[in-house]
Amino acid sequence: MPKRLQLTFDSELLETISADFDLRAPNREALRQLAFVLDGDYDPEVMQVLNLATGVGKTYLMAAFIEYLRAKGVGNAVIVTPGKVVQAKTIANFTPGQPGYIAGSPVPPDIVTPQNYAPWIARLNSGTQPASGAQTPVLAFIFNIHQLIAPKTLEGDTHGSGQEAMKRKPRRFDENAGVLFDYLRELDDLVVIADESHLYGVSAEAFHGALRELQPAAMIGLTASVDKTKDHVIYEYPLYRAIQDRYVKAPVLAFRKGGYTGAAASEEQQLRDAIQLRAYKQDFYDTYADTHSRARLNAVLLVVCADTEHADQITSLLRTSEYFGSDFAVLQVDSNHDKEDTNRFLAGLEKPDSPVKAVVSVNKLKEGWDVKNVAVIVTLRAMASEVLTQQTMGRGLRLPFGAYTGVGQIDQLDIVAHQSFEELLDAENVLQQFGLEQAVKDSDPSRVRTAIRQAAEQASGGDALDGTPDASADGSPDGRISASRGVSIGVETSETGQPGMTIRHIPETGTSCTPNFPEPPQVVTITRNPDFAEVTYTFPVTTVKQEQPRFDLSAIPRKTIADAAKRVTSAKDVLLRKEIVAALGKDLHGADLESAEVDSIPVAAEAAEHALVKLVLNLQQVPKTPETAGYVKSFLVPIFCNSVDFAHWTVKTLGCAQALLRKIISDYIKELSREIREVPVIHPKTMPGSGYILLLGEKVHAQIDNRRDFVRGRVYAGWFKSLFSAESFDSYTGEYELAKLLNTSPSIVWWHRLHPADGAFVSYNALDRYFPDFVALDRQGVHWIIEAKSERGRDDATVAAKRRAAEALVQRLAAETAFAGQYWGYLIGFESDIAAADSWDDLKALAQPVSNLV
């Protein structure tokens, strides 16, 4: 019978782990789905595949899943990687202190590699076994797939770095531990996690066979490329959704209307266009980094060549003075250039001092090359017979600053095509040629052709590339540079605000070989209002911590232990008796007879005591500490055993004793949980900051007088009592109207619009918090924490919980040293109250706020 994990679905644990690892929404969903499947009647011999788009964070999902396994008492996982590069990266991901380490687990796994068996040997020698909820680390065996395939022969060296030596080592006897492969195969709880699992599918017989030979209790696959005819996919998050949800860059297919004609000349012109585009994007990278206090980052050009010989030619060309003019600015990465210096430059590609501006490779770029700053990919005509693999295209999808910026030239990946307008129209499947078939929900060729045609028409109109994400339909967003955003496929960006796959032209001017890119838009900084430039205040940031009494089994009264022991039954076992009755013409049947009492199987007193100690220490909630173990062995169990009313232990009395002892511990834990208290903690935070930068291309707008003209997130000027000269809002009838009221009320001295980035929040329980909308100082000297709410919130339980927490905070501030001599209040302004009020005093009368002003 195949081995299968015994994992019960634990929703609360999943939520905790997802929060600890700060998982993105799709990874949270994938983790829940995986836990749900493993709680069911799954087939251990079938790989459960999670298909997530490149750049979403599959390694974070892997780390969170291993933590879930640890918390559930599963102690062994084999992580399979496709090669040495990904293997080294994965080891770093799970090693505290290493670059790329994924934090989140209180007990990081112990890492075993072909070069380091020490954690495995130590575990075997210690005799420690994992238990549900235990603090024992998972043993994570990180191997690349080539190291798991059976060698040609077991005879030979196991210490060398060659492939055959690496293959022999797990299958050869180790004098300190035995045979690793046999150890793994005999485990009941082994989980195999295959990274880039599309490489180990059923069609890859050697790879797939190596995984099945381990006979794991579960096989999990993580990939961005599945074969839906063969793979058992349990969760899917395609690329187009990752683009819409702003987890990765939006790909842009860029082309010259006339294409690139001529052999060598065409490649050179295509490279010049790509280099100009890279330099254009670099301006946006630099401006964003400077204005957001981030380290500068090179916008990198990735050049995809047909083969290594072609890559040699292109690298030499790009290093000449007509292009980058530096050997260090161009890095060649292929099978002929895989040396230490190359890997060092490649590893440092995201560092501010990296000299590399272009990477030249072939179309088989390996998985695991996970950099964030590829801004432009160019596919040269010499590789026209091939398609750009999705894995290669995916190398450029990660966001350079870790999150969506709202700046198109940063949040987009440009792929410069070698084809002309006509060639693109004639192509049978354009998106597949560039690895983009999953970038749109519906890749209908006719829709793609329409987008290409429309982009070419924009070219005829003389439009140019734009650095802003929200240009208007006519290409003239509020007087800014006339520009074309290209034509979106599959997502109506102008209506939904979601990014999507785009096709656009590369602008040309007359006979010039240089594309006509406009200057990046100017940076707009929102500064302090001169009348309040020196004003600061302290905001009471509030968190809630849970205080739980220390788990201490010595708190269980001795009398409770002794009384339970006295209830252990010493009765004999019962032998049920039936008489077999045969009646003419009827089947045989049994008739009950008087039962007989028989002696139960005896158990030695030492064995019974040992069994009871083991029971207590293996209970999930009992801490696995030396102090707890010592108390259980030296006091709790001996007291229990000395209090029983019989002299000799049996199997029956031991079973009864185990049940009673388990109940004692369970009752103590329930009592302990009732004593958990939620305690607010106040963290004084000096406000406000010095100012903030608008997204590139945005500008400040004049105030408005009606809801129809309001745009959420737009910045409006004209606030003479605000601490800042201009502000943005999320709603008109709530926040915007309340700001106007505060701005014109004689009772208000100043007001400050709060944004989530300010970090000014109030927690209303241990898990949830909210961000108020305003702080205002009135002429009575009261600082008011203010929220604007829709009418729906009047009877909302969450709003009520927030209000209770804020009211308690206001009272508590009267006793806080950091707020001595200050008065604070809290007010919720519902839309109808804001509309009915002509002043701050009117709103207070309607809203019935609370304050600590006596």
Image: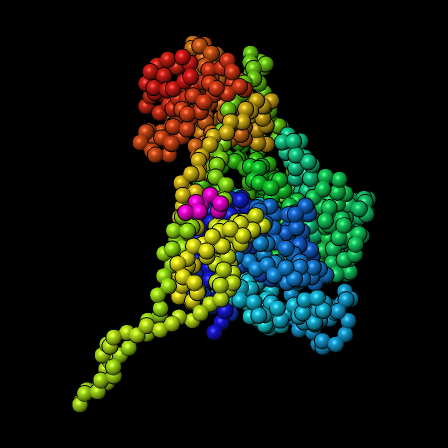
Residue 88 appears anywhere in the view: yes
Q: Is residue 617 above or below residue 572?
A: above
Of residues 325 and 166, the one drawn nearer to the viewer in this rendering: 166
Residue 219 appears anywhere in the view: no
Q: Position of residue 617 (x, y in %)?
A: 51, 55
Q: Position of residue 155 (x, y in %)?
A: 74, 76
Q: At x 25% / y 81%, what residue is drawn?
A: 579
Residue 403 in magenta stretch: no
**51 left or right, relative to 811:** right
Q: At x 41% / y 25%, what residue is drawn?
A: 808
Of residues 309 and 425, the one drawn nearer to the viewer in this rendering: 309
Residue 792: which quarter of the image?
top left
Q: At x 43% / y 59%, what residue is drawn?
A: 658
Of residues 674 and 449, the one drawn nearer to the viewer in this rendering: 674
Q: Is residue 784 above or below residue 402?
A: above
Q: Is residue 306 above or below residue 591?
A: above
Magenta residue span = 553-559
Q: At x 34% / y 19%, what residue is drawn?
A: 848
Question: Magenta span: helix, strand or loop, mainly?
Answer: helix
Q: Position of residue 237 (x, y in %)?
A: 49, 53
